[in-house]
């Protein structure tokens, strides 16, 4: 909710001693806002009495208030030339400067009038309003208080004072001085008890500051006044959405929408309809939302708020190109539109047009300085392209007496939105006290990632693995080449080739088994919470063995925040040759499991907060023609985000699924991970 613009207050003509009684009709026109009639009337008077000062003053006011401020200013300039010492003429000339938005000149002018007459209520009030328009709110409040000392309780001055407090609070809100903004709004409430405008601004402040409980309390206060009930319900629905309680949000917005009845006030009908459609979208009731939007667009085909709703609906449905088209239409109608600029930025980001997304977000800030959503959007986008360093240290062991300790480090260094350098180093030492095998390996690779098209990215690394084992030392070339493709909406396909050394335990490292993998990963999401992931590997090895691996997962998203999903996994593996004394290599392996997964994603976690992930699964596995065996798998992660640039987490895994290791053992791993962004922002952005 944006702050209402300050209204220019008409000066009260304090002395009309020269008025003739036969001009009362014209005065009435001015007092009742019939400015066109007043203009016609006083023009008639001046035809008969061209030098009548009062008629000239009133004509100037009628013209200015009727939407012709420049002409009014010219008339008052002429009057001032004729009556250079007349204070009343000076006041009206000063007001004409306000009408023409010449605030710097008005500031100087009214200050001189106050020096001439420190107790002039019109001069004090006009000076205060001038300062307010210049956003010098602190001084504006001082001078409106001086005006009220002259005329205590004057309604025009009180109205000005209220909006000065609102403007001052909004200024602090934009600067993210939330505590000061709250203090000003609460002080305003002591002056104007339960004022709707102030309460709405206070609720909006709490929303922006993330204090949703306070926002809810404030909207409930607003709703205590019956005529404000619908406004309060609209606000409460938004609060529930921000609290991830979308079902409650829909109930509240539906109550407000159905309560409109025969209401025709656009200032109430439009935001209530808008909130109801938004709530439908939040709850993935896309068909109902689309019907409402389509029906409204038939009668109002170019209304920005309806175009924005349709664009939002298409973003939720991942029809991002359609969203961009609607946002472009909005910007044709109004280049300063907040929804148009920032909405377009989000849609462009989703389809991979990152440079254009930056531009749209920056356009938003040219119209809405320091706006929090736009600022956060750029900050999030910056994080995607800021160089980072990540290190993991892990310790693993199994019931086959294999133990291993490893450290891996990787660096990603983007030099544009399309290109980044990649570097990886890994050290691992593994041993087995039963077989008396020990081995150490060092892995080093360099590579790059390049976005060829918005929906097509190439990633490639090449390097060496150097191993020292009990009876064998060697160095092998390894590589990983992949294409990330987004062929259609809600679909992602990765295809690639990867070579690697079989390094699960010391004995396998000693054998120098090189694995060549051709792989594909396919992910499909839907608009009804169902998802499907499938992975296929074909592997051939330098020991003349070959492997085919298929993994598929069907899952259902129960919650969005935190992410909670459950589903079924199935895995099938077959090897050409069976060498069970060396590594797990069945002719057939089948495994099925049911799992549940909960995640609080580190990417959306605020600084100085915890993030986590937990997966639990159980099922059955079938090795060759043997009896089925029960399986379990537990994976967990707990971390803390210290700042926008640094985080640390502990992770662990325990599983008895045979395919989880190369040897078919029950496997355990614990580790520590640290991630640090090297800079505050991308190196290619100023």
Image (cartoon, rainbow, N blue to C red):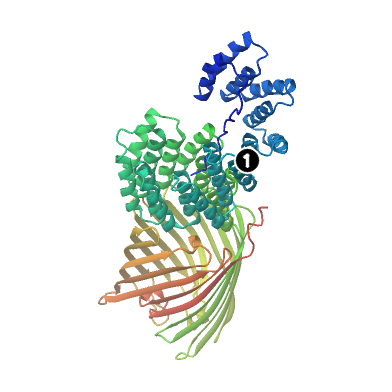
Residue 599 position in % (x across, y down): 41, 65
**Viewer-closest of 236 and 409:** 236
Q: Residue at x 67, y 36 (%)?
A: 103
Depicted 398 relative to depicted 622: above or below: below
Q: Does residue 503 appear in the picture of this structure?
A: no
* Residue depicted at 50% across the width and 82% down the height: 404
Decide which of 219, 644 is in the foreground and name it.
219
- Number of labels in the image equals 1
Give above or below for 581 relative to 319: below
Please state if 147 lies on the left or on the right of 81 as rendered.
left
Q: Is residue 165 left or right of residue 586?
A: right
Residue 288: percent from left, percent from top: 31, 41
User: Crowding near pointer 1: few (<14 within 10 Å), some, many (20+)?
Assistant: many
Left or right of 686: which side holds 304?
left
Q: Secondary structure at mark 1?
A: helix
Q: In the rendered image, is residue 624 in sight?
A: yes
Q: Nearer the viewer, residue 431 or 384?
A: 384
What x and y, as percent, mark residue 134? Answer: 64, 41
- The residue to which callout 1 is attached is 128
- Residue 231 appears left or right of 377: left
Percent coordinates x, y for residue 519 in the rendering = 45, 61
Q: Nearer the viewer, residue 540 or 179?
A: 179
């Amino acid at each position: 909710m944006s702050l209402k613009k300050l209204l220019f207050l008409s000066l009260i003509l304090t002395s009309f001693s020269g008025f003739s009684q036969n001009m009362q009709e014209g005065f009435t026109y001015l007092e009742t806002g019939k400015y066109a009639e007043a203009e016609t009337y006083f023009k008639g008077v001046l035809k008969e009495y061209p030098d009548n000062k009062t008629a000239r003053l009133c004509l100037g006011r009628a013209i200015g208030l009727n939407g012709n401020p420049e002409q009014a200013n010219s008339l008052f300039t002429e009057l001032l030339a004729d009556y250079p010492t007349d204070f009343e003429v000076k006041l009206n000339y000063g007001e004409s400067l306000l009408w023409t938005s010449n605030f710097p000149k008005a500031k100087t002018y009214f200050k001189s009038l106050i020096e001439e007459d420190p107790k002039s209520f019109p001069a004090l009030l006009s000076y205060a309003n001038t300062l307010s328009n210049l956003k010098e709110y602190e001084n504006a409040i001082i001078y409106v208080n001086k005006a009220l000392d002259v005329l205590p309780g004057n309604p025009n001055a009180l109205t000005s004072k209220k909006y000065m407090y609102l403007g001052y609070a909004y200024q602090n809100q934009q600067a993210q001085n939330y505590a000061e903004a709250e203090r000003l709004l609460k002080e305003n409430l002591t002056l104007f008890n339960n004022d709707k405008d102030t309460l709405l601004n206070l609720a909006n402040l709490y929303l922006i500051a993330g204090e949703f409980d306070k926002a809810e309390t404030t909207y409930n206060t607003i709703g205590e006044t019956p005529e404000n009930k619908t406004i309060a319900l609209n606000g409460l629905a938004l609060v529930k959405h921000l609290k991830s309680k979308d079902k409650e949000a829909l109930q509240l917005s539906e109550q407000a929408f159905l309560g409109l009845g025969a209401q025709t006030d656009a200032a109430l009908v439009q935001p209530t309809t808008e909130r109801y459609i938004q709530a439908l979208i939040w709850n993935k009731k896309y068909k109902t939302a689309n019907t409402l939007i389509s029906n409204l667009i038939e009668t109002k085909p170019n209304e920005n708020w309806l175009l924005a709703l349709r664009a939002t609906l298409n973003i939720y449905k991942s029809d991002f190109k359609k969203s961009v088209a609607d946002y472009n239409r909005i910007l044709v109608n109004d280049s300063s539109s907040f929804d148009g600029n920032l909405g377009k930025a989000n849609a462009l980001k989703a389809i991979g047009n990152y440079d254009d997304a930056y531009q749209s977000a920056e356009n938003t800030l040219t119209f809405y300085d320091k706006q929090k959503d736009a600022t956060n959007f750029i900050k999030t986008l910056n994080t995607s392209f800021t160089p980072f360093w990540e290190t993991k240290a892990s310790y693993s062991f199994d019931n086959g007496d294999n133990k291993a300790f490893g450290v891996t480090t990787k660096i990603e260094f983007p030099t544009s939105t399309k290109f980044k350098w990649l570097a990886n180093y890994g050290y691992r030492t593994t041993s087995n006290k039963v077989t008396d095998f020990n081995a150490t390996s060092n892995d080093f690779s360099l590579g790059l990632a390049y976005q060829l098209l918005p929906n097509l990215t190439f990633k490639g690394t090449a390097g060496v693995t150097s191993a020292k084992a009990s009876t064998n030392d060697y160095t092998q070339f390894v590589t990983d080449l992949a294409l990330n493709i987004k062929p259609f909406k809600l679909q992602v396909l990765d295809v690639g080739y990867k070579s690697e050394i079989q390094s699960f335990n010391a004995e396998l490292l000693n054998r120098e088994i090189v694995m060549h993998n051709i792989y594909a990963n396919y992910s499909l999401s839907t608009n009804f919470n169902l998802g499907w992931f499938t992975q296929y590997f074909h592997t051939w090895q330098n020991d003349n063995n070959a492997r085919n691996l298929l993994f598929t997962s069907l899952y259902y998203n129960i919650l969005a925040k935190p992410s909670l999903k459950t589903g079924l996994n199935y895995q099938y593996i077959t090897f050409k040759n069976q060498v069970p004394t060396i590594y797990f290599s069945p002719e057939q392996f089948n495994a099925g499991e049911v799992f549940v997964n909960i995640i609080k994603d580190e990417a959306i976690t605020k600084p100085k907060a915890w993030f986590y992930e937990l997966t639990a699964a159980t099922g059955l596995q079938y090795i060759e023609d043997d009896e089925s065996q029960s399986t379990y798998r537990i994976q967990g992660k707990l971390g803390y985000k210290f700042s926008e640039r640094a985080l640390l987490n502990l992770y662990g895994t325990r599983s008895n699924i045979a395919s989880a290791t190369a040897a078919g053992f029950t496997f355990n791993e614990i580790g520590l991970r640290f991630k640090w962004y090297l800079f505050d922002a991308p190196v290619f952005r100023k």
